[in-house]
Image: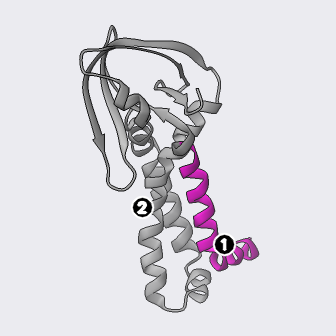
Amino acid sequence: MRNLVRFIARHSTLLFFAYMAVSLWPGLVIRSEFNAPFLIAFKYLSAPILAGCLWFGLRYKDVFVAACKKKSDYWVGLILFPLLAVLFSGGLVLQANALIPPQKVVWLDGVVTRKEYLGGRWKDYVVSINTQDGAKRIVVSWREYEALQVGAHYHQKRRVGPFGFSYTYIWE
């Protein structure tokens, strides 16, 4: 076990970037209800991720301190890594919702009530739609965003995964 911990300590930056890539990829290819995966991730995964990372970091403190150039690097990593791991876990929820059965095909049908774009360099184009089930905020492509008008009818085939929020792939 000590050898595995030493490997993790020595290659923690590389391992974290791999975790980021696996977490970010679903957000690039899957469009879902706005913020749904992140809300589920924060609600159900934040406590276990924080507890697990802190336990692991404190349990093997000597190995991690030895792998760091300065002792302060260990403490910064111990605080920063769990917080970033929770932040990036939304992508894992999105991916799990798309891959784990059961998957149900639904039609999102309603009237566009609001259009907005959020973010800085990378924008999310969000459209609010009134459906029979209530209001939904979904992320759409820029092309779709430009074509839609407030008051227009919206009709799209989507899937609903086991976590209960709808999604579509960018190529559909």
Image location of residue 171, percent across then percent down: 59, 31
Across and down, in percent, residue 113 comes to: 24, 20
Is 118 drawn above or below residue 36 in the view shown? below
Which range of residues does the magenta coloring cover?
Answer: 1-26
**Side of 10 where 126 appears, left or right:** left
| Residue drawn at the location 51% of the way across and 44% of the way down | 27
Residue 116, position as x, y percentages in the image: 27, 36
Q: Where residue 152 sits in the image (x, y, percent)?
A: 29, 14
Location of residue 8 (image quadrant): bottom right
Q: Is residue 138 something that shows in the picture?
A: no
For residue 113, side relative to residue 159 (left or right) = left
Could you tell me which residue is drawn at 75 percent across and 76 percent down? 3
Residue 13 part of the magenta-drawn span: yes
The residue carrying mark 1 is 8
Q: Which residue lies furthest to the bottom in this view?
A: 70
Residue 78 in sight: yes
Question: Which residue is more in the foreground, 84 or 139?
Answer: 139
Disc ID at residue 83: 2
Q: Horizontal placement of 124 versus 81: left or right?
A: left
Asked whether, in this view, residue 41 is left or right of residue 95, the answer is left
Instruction: Using the image as rendered, state which of residue 50 and residue 122 is in the foreground.
Output: 122
- Depth order, front residue of 24/120: 120
Query: Going 41% across and 42% down the picture, which residue do you hit?
Result: 38
Question: Can you say whether 119 is above or below 115 in the image?
Answer: below
Give the residue type that dot 1 points to: Ile
Crowd tier of the residue under label 1, counting other residues whose Cα lies within 10 Å: few below 14, some 14–19, many 20 or above: some
